Amino acid sequence: MAYTVSPTATWDTIEDVFYRKEEVYQMAWNVPDLSDYLVAVSRNGGPIALMRDERKVLLQSRHTGGKPKIQVYASSGRLIATFTWELSPPILLQFTGTHLVVLSDEGTYRLYDLSSPGEYTQHTLGSEVADLGVVSARAWEDGLVVLTGGLQFVETRGWKGGRVSQLVDSGLSEAPHSWAVIPPEYSASGHVEVLVSTGSTVVTLDALERVDQRISRGPFSHIALSPNGRFLALVTATGMLWVVSSDFARNLSEVDISQFAGSGTDLHGLPDRLPERVKWCGDNAVVLSWGGRVVIVGPKGESIQYDHPPAAVIVGEVDSLRIISSATCEVLQKVPDALLAVFRPGSDHPAAVLYDALDHFERKSPKADEAIRSIRPDLARAVDTCIEAAGQEWEVTWQRRLLKAAQFGRAFLDLYNPNDFVTMAQTLKVLNAVRYYEVGIPITYQQYIAAGAPALISRLLTRNEHVLALRISQHLGLRPDPVLKHWAAARITRAKGDPRDTDGDAALCDAIVSKFEKEGEKDVSYSDIAQKAYENGRVRLATMLLDHESRAAEQVPLLLRMKQDKIALEKAVGSGDTDLVYHVLLRLHSSLSPGEFFAVLDDSLSPQLTPAVKLLQVYAKENDRQLLRDFYYQDDRRTENATLEMEEAGTSAVAEERIEHLKQAAKFFAEDKARGFEAKMADEAQRLLAVQLQYERETDHKFDFAGLTVDAFISELLIEGLGKRADRIRADWKVPDKRWWWLKLKALAKTHNWEGIETFAKSKKSPIGYEPFVTHLLSLDPPQPLHAASYVPRCDAKARPDLYAKCGQWGKAAESAKERGDKDKLEEIRRSAPPGLPQREVEEVIRRPK
């Protein structure tokens, strides 16, 4: 089989090291001279941003007037987006993963969303930087460092308005010759470090200290850090390229580069010996450029030179270097070891033998079998190398050829895991798809492995290549959610419908849901898309989308932000998550007026909110009684409100407050016709408490009456000798005679007022009888049997024998029984009488004639 171009046709050597320069695109743009522009190029095959350099005097015929514009192109030269720039001249253009950052010389920077042209967020580095101005700036993946007009360095981390902090005092008295940033992941301190060329030395700065590296080769016009952070390439003012370790401990090479400068001149008409750009080609070589001349320099001064008139931009990558000119986009790279093993002239590597064996096999030559036999012990390694080489190759024809060689070798292996082969085939399908001219992402295999498939998909989404991103996700077995969400957000952003157009919202919602159900997975989330709809003023659409969200925890926060309070509460209740319901209730309570809050909670109109109402009562009862009181009041729950007031009265330590709570309780009970008894009891309770407080004041607070029941209050008054007040309480609260006699009997007995008891007993006929007098006096400590016995004659005749016996007067007990003619009782007393005197008294009564 014949092939038009050999894989080695683009190879060159520097000191026995092979490099290749692959032309990946013929540029589609109409840009005659890149030197007229400020240029930013994204890593890993990303887009290119161009902005006319306003500081240069340009021919009017080459550029149109008007406001400055930033044009973003794919690496193939296809226009992706155009942004307008109205601020002061930019100092820095830098790509992040999904945005283009543009920094003005006043310290203001914008983040342009590549997927939504015209949309940007704007941030500032602070008023101090704005006053001093920005001289120059350098960026890394997650932030930037600027040199202010005061010759101090200021750092900000994060691209969305991160905190601005000043590094240690630079000690500069004039602008540095050059400077570079070492990102935190490569610095020894773990913080951002700045390398500054000042005088003949280099100074390292960070947030804490300034370290002079104490070298005398400067000044340096360029300082370039290798992709792995281990090496530095410095260009001296005398035209020497000096490569050292990043800590300046090891000198790796020195090369005189003035020989590559050509006949160009600088702004002063002097020979231009210094390059415009210095970049690393992976971690292997340093590449210099003068205008359109690009030179890759080896450690011993050998070089390869390429010309791209009138100007070229070089961009260092993790494994290669991109050369962008007006006409082409090329990739310069050290030839990977796997390709060398297969295609290097004269290679005897098993992979090369396997590749030749395939050629012999296709020509039906017996040499194929001989070749396989010769590498039999290393056949597995040969297969792996061919698979690896296929991933490193740009041309699809050679990719297929190498994979076919690997497949051919696999046939002779008894045990071989095909996962690597399958994975490489899938990867190459992805790489070839994004390298396609209309997509224009010339990412290498090594860059793809380092960044990962999600990063590539994210880059496609910034270009709104949703179909390709979705197919790649499905092809690689990744979740399609990010792609579908970005597509839906873009669809909502582009929709120009009236937010009040219900039909338009319904149609768009149906389209999004249909796409998600067709292409997505079952548990795909709609909350992020609903958030985008809400941000675009499509509240109804956002609500419709949230109806399809299966996770209430994702629905509720957005519904609350959208002021869809009742729906948010219904969703929280429907989820069965108590914490989520409490979250909604507390959020609504803090953000709504009481009337609005209780209107949302009206479970008479929305019975499904009953659990939320119950939870509110539980919470308010423990934490906010006033909230519970307000809720009962607005919901006409008089009985519950009265009960709450009664509870408050019971727990209040201040008597006056208890009175107020009891009055309120009586009022609420009175408003419910079925609670008349409760209303009367509450009213009497507060009247009683008021009287008790009045009596305390009248007695100069010698006694504590507050909180006593009617019985206890009367008893206390009797004990303290306040009989008239006790009589008044008895009359006012209509205490029955039986209870009154009991209370007075106990009070008089407690004070040992035996005469008072006698007088009280004779005052009138006792409604409780006189047996209680006997039993109560006997129950005292100590018992009073003599006083108790004096009341036995007034008791019922049938009970007297037992009462006398309890009083210890056995003789009188026997006489009472004998008088009644109760022989059985008399015999019982005889048996029960203690021996001795009581026994003789009983015997005497028995013997005595009637």
Image (tube, rainbow, N blue to C red):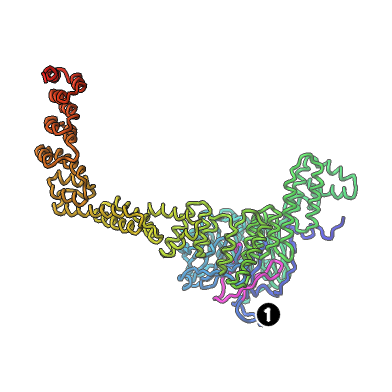
Query: 11 or 496: nearer the eye?
Result: 496
The magenta stretch spans residue 713: no
Q: Nearer the viewer, residue 689 or 377?
A: 689
**Circle 1 sits on which residue?**
62
Q: Is residue 273 left or right of residue 566?
A: right
The residue under the point 13% across, 49% down is: 724
Q: Which image quadrant: the N terminus?
A: bottom right
Would you say residue 278 is visible in this rendering? no
In front of the other: 522 or 655: 655
Q: Residue at x 20, y 47 (%)?
A: 713
Q: Indicate whether residue 83 is drawn in magenta.
A: yes
What are the residue bounds of the magenta stretch?
69-97
Please indicate whether residue 409 sits to the left or right of residue 548 in the image. Answer: right
The secondary structure type at the circle numbered 1 is helix
Horizontal relation, residue 454 to residue 150: left or right: right
Q: Position of residue 572 (x, y in %)?
A: 51, 56
The answer to which of 555 and 67 lies nearer the viewer is 555
- Considering only vertical position in the picture, is 769 above or below 449? above
Q: How many marks?
A: 1
For the question of whether residue 725 can be seen, the reply is yes
**Which three-letter amino acid code belongs to the residue tagged 1?**
Arg
